[in-house]
Amino acid sequence: MGTLGFEFGKIYIIESLPETEASIRDGQKTTSGEYFARKLIPYCNTVSQKQVEFQLCKVSSAKELQDVLMSIKKVAKHEYPLIHFEIHGTEGQDGIALINKDVVYWPELLHSLRSINIECDNNLLVLLATCLAHTILNQSI
């Protein structure tokens, strides 16, 4: 068990936000995923006993999101992932909306995350910085 109370080997920040939502933070125009990475990684490296790897994955479509999740699944057994989503929720409260207007519904997302969780021996942590993300709790997990 790591200093943070659980173990993870790599942080993946999956972002699908339009560039128009980038804003000035600390004097630089950045998206929230970029800003989060810049702030979180130094903190984790301060409290962790080892350097924390991270990858910012910008996706535009459901296909790109599925490709990223499949690539995480392939390495999940060896690098326990922490997955942070910076994506809009849908108005219908039934999933996430990507830049190109694709919708990934909660059951589909949960299926992908469940398969990653199995690969990493039930050690997956998922953070959803997504409006209406609480509606995922209405799904069968």
Image (cartoon, grey):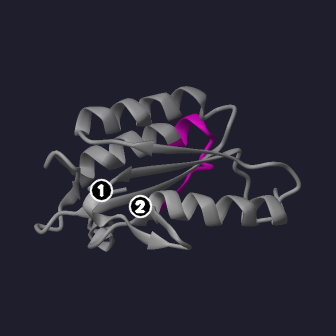
Residue 119 among those drawn in magenta: yes
Q: Position of residue 73 (x, y in %)?
A: 51, 32
Q: Which secondary structure lies at badge 2?
A: loop
Q: Residue at x 68, y 37 (%)?
A: 79
Structural distance between the alpha carbons of marks 2 and 1 = 7 Å
Dot 1 corresponds to which residue?
A: 19
What is the x, y in percent for residue 129?
40, 67
Nearest to the observer: residue 76 or residue 45: 45
Q: Nearer the viewer, residue 8 or 100?
A: 100
Q: Residues within 10 Å of mark 1 (few under 14, many from 20)?
A: few
Left or right of 13: which side holds 120? right
Q: Can residue 15 be seen in this snapshot? A: yes
Residue position for label 2? 31
Residue at horizontal 79 percent and vertical 58 percent from the top: 45
- Marks 1 and 2: in contact by CB < 8 Å? yes
Q: Would residue 99 be counted in the magenta stretch?
A: no
Q: Earlier in the sequence, mark 2 or mark 1?
A: 1
Residue at 71% across / 44% down in the picture?
9
Answer with the quarter of the image where residue 74 lies.
top right
Give the quadrant of the C terminus.
bottom left
Secondary structure of the residue carrying tag 1 is helix
**Compared with residue 114, is residue 84 higher up or lower down, i.e. above or below?**
below
